[in-house]
Amino acid sequence: MAGSTPASATASPAGAPPGGPGGAPAARAAQSVSPWTEAWRRFKRHRLAFWSLWLLGTLVAAVLLGPLFYKVGINEVDFSAKLSTPSWKHPMGTDDLGRDILARVLYGGRISLAVGLAAMLMAVTVGVFIGAVAGMARGWVDAALMWVTDLFLSLPQLPLLLLLIFLFREPLKAAFGLEMGIFILIVVVIGGFRWMPVARLVRAQFFSLREKEFVEAARALGASVPRQVVRHILPNSLGPVIVAATIDIAAAIIAESTLSFLGLGFPPDIPTWGRILYDGRDYMDLAMHWALFPGIAIFLTVLTINFIGDGLRDALDPRRVL
Amino acid sequence: MSPPGRPEGEFRSAQREGTPMSNAPLLKVEGLVKHFPVKGGILGRVVDKVHAVDGVSFDLQAGETLGVVGESGCGKSTTGRCILRLIEPTAGTVWFEGKNVTAMGTTELRGMARDMQIIFQDPYASLNPRMTVQAIVGEALTIHKLAPDPAAYEARIVELLQVVGLSADHLRRYPHEFSGGQRQRIGIARALAVSPKLIVCDEAVSALDVSIQAQVINLLEDLQSQFGLTYLFIAHDLSVVEHISDRVAVMYLGRIVEIATSRDLYTQPRHPYTEALLSAVPIPDPLVKRKRIPLQGDVPNPIRPPPGCHFHTRCPIAQKGLCDVQSPVLKVVGDGHQVACHLRS
Amino acid sequence: MPLLDIRGLKTHFKTEDGWLHAVDGVDIAIDAGQTVCVVGESGCGKSVTAKTVMKLIDMPPGKIVAGQVLWQGRDLVPLGPQEMQKIRAKEIAIIFQEPMTSLNPVYTVGAQIAESIRLHEGLSKREALNRAVEMLRLVNIPTPERRVYDYPHQFSGGMRQRVMIAIALACSPKLLIADEPTTALDVTIQAQILELMVELKERMGMAILLITHAMGVVAETAQRVVVMYAGKVVEEASVEDLFARPRHPYTQGLIRSIPRIDTAATHKVRLEAIAGTVPKLINPAEGCRFADRCKHAMPACRSATPPLVEATPGHKVACILEAALA
């Protein structure tokens, strides 16, 4: 009716969800939905990724907690039980020295996962740093860094891996002790070859994001460059980086297994999955279970990680936000 | 704290139009130039320049709204950004309250952010999707240490949200939960957080629906009278610019071709481009029939602008030998009315 | 018989939150040679209506839930892709807002115009190219015989839109649907394009369905106007009647919230904004969708959706208040 004025000509209905009345989102209006919550919701809808997450979680729990319950030693030699097939006493069978394979697989899993995680962290840290610096600085700094990246990308990985291991194995063993030394070597060597795609990704993200208006707005507010990077650009560029990181874990585990399989990784008495495979390769016809179980372990871990990476990519796809 | 309500139909205060102001302008732009390099060749050397802004000068008095209007490629957005030094000008000087902004170092410039702010066009891209409304609006308070304690911080943010027509319920929400108009309000609250003197509105309402546009225009006007703000209102919609501005500057291909009060610009346009522009603006009334002044051809490439007057290639009255050789300068033709045209000034 | 008669059209989209009622019972009729403007803001369903006519909606998640689209008496809704292909471009053509993304960047404009001609009229390559040159000349592109070999990126925004018009008109359709054709263009170019469209319409005896959100464009080009809000038609009238006496509160609010350049400069009046925002169309409630933003809303407005009735001859409105006054 004429004369009745709305509360304020320029106000939106206070507290009402932007959808206005009569909408289904009324329930969601009670709590806000952060972009991460949204992403988790989307991830859950990706069936394969979701079940992979559960499976991987189970694997990791088994590997971490298993040895607490399954107290068979990894080096318990028992010639009477050598090369026995899976049974109640030895669920995964035994190797040629009668050692229980399940115990060795569980132990080896810790090392493989640790290597995978550490190598990924190293690759991501180096990659994000270089990509961020290149993306923000542009100009000749960017050109120089990209030149270095291209250089690393064109290096032949396997021969270099072998060379580095050959050169640095003894010094590192002397400095950090046997296991730690080799661990550091493997992690640096694997991670050192995987940072380049991450750097490229991050640089590309920085290029596109630094022109975005919300970053310009932060500049206009007086934000320093570090603040722009940490508060605005990095959080929005993490999507593709997270996806690349999960794939990196899988690749690192395979790389470690390969190295161990070639006899170049950890010392022979440390039962990483690749090492167990290496040990069992001569007995494939006699005692297939020896190579089969660590092989399945590697396969399942890498498979689930890749599916999770797929799910994450869909969940974090920036085009779906908004 | 709510903006003053106005009954409909009331004339806006004529104060700004008639009352003499203090003589020193709040903002003075002199000979602003911005060229963007065009890289080419194998080594990526600079082969050409985009003449985005080609010598822009104007004054802005405290409390007034200067509209800057022009079509795409005329350099109006670049001008706005150069004033804040979001883009570094190639040449020219910007004076704010007598201080040389173009010569300032990083720290001093950060201090200027408390006096000059900007509102962007795209309500979807101008807010960080991963920050809450509280963080977005309060960022300036954090950067400039304007809030002594967390309670004062939150209180100030709530105050700002209420001023723009939002509420405390919106503090912990994320941008994607809001409509375009509401996001633009968040952007306005963000700009107001530092209590600036000057706000550059860079196509601030262009991406909004018509009915929301009116809400935001009214909000900007209310805020101006409430807080004594000065606006540099950049837009391509001449009707909106005429409505909100006291004075209007028309830009074409990097140069200002005419400045006048909004009334004079419409009733007595001098520059042929202004005339053509005015005749092309559609009027929401089928009974009003105007004669359209057609412009030949397209806007020239800003990489190689025409010599002399940039407009001469499309100008219906261009004089060979004069307009294609000599660049016209802005000359005063009336009270507050300047034109850059050899034949009309 | 009207050329195009949309009756009770409902197009809904399946989303994870429910069905989105993008178009919810729309009636629009266009006669041969007429210019009808559909005006409304974003989310009102005008673009979806146009795309439904051309069957350009992805059928999941979209679905034509009800209604008919009668083209010269024949319902297009049940038609399959083969039959629709004979109608598109030949009988009804459509041009969109963004000419750069509507044109294929890897083909010459001549090839793109000729493609349409060859598909529908079976001409040879040479003949089709000649026709393409003619079309470019028709849309006032200078030196068309040379430009026909150029690529889209070699044209400016306004020229590209002309090329789009040339493609659309190549087979002399009886109806041209233009979905916000000038929104992305500068105002001087916009004026040129609109003028061109009207001129071609006269020349070819075409009808135009122009979709826009700009009332100024409506005032200058339309003969009849259909105002849409939240998926429904709220008012329909001749352009003179609509502006002289807008009946629906939304139309009134819309007209009063636009700054007019002829009055803005000389006679500054505060804009009358419509409070609130467009409601979300997922599982909408009963009742008038404008009720929450309407100054005159009464309880009766929320109980049932007001039907579109004829308030005065040729002037329809969907508002119980106005219907009572008529």
Image (cartoon, coloured by chain):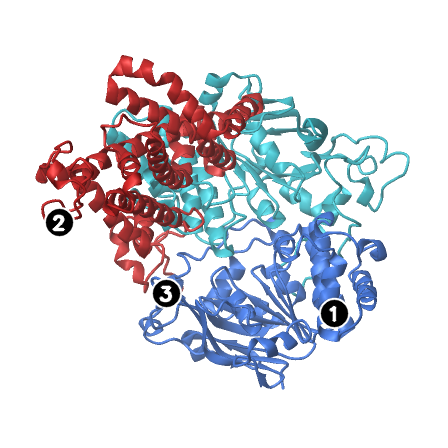
Chain colours: A red, B cyan, C blue
| Amino acid at the residue labelled 2 | Ser
| Amino acid at the residue labelled 1 | Ile
Circle 2 or circle 1, nearest the eye:
2
Q: Quadrant of residue C299?
A: bottom left
Residue annotated with mark 3: C282
Total number of numbered discs in the rendering: 3
Instruction: State the image coordinates of residue B245 (x, y, percent, origin top left).
Output: 57, 41
Q: Quadrant of the N terminus of chain B?
A: top left
Q: Quadrant of the C terminus of chain B?
A: top right
| Amino acid at the residue labelled 3 | Ile
Residue annotated with mark 2: A87
Instruction: State the image coordinates of residue B172 (x, y, percent, origin top left).
Output: 29, 43
Return the residue nearer the eye: A70 or C262. Answer: A70
Assess whether mark 1 and mark 3 are in contact (beta carbons under 8 angstroms): no
Marking on residue C117: 1
Question: Which chain does the numbered disc 3 sit on?
Answer: C
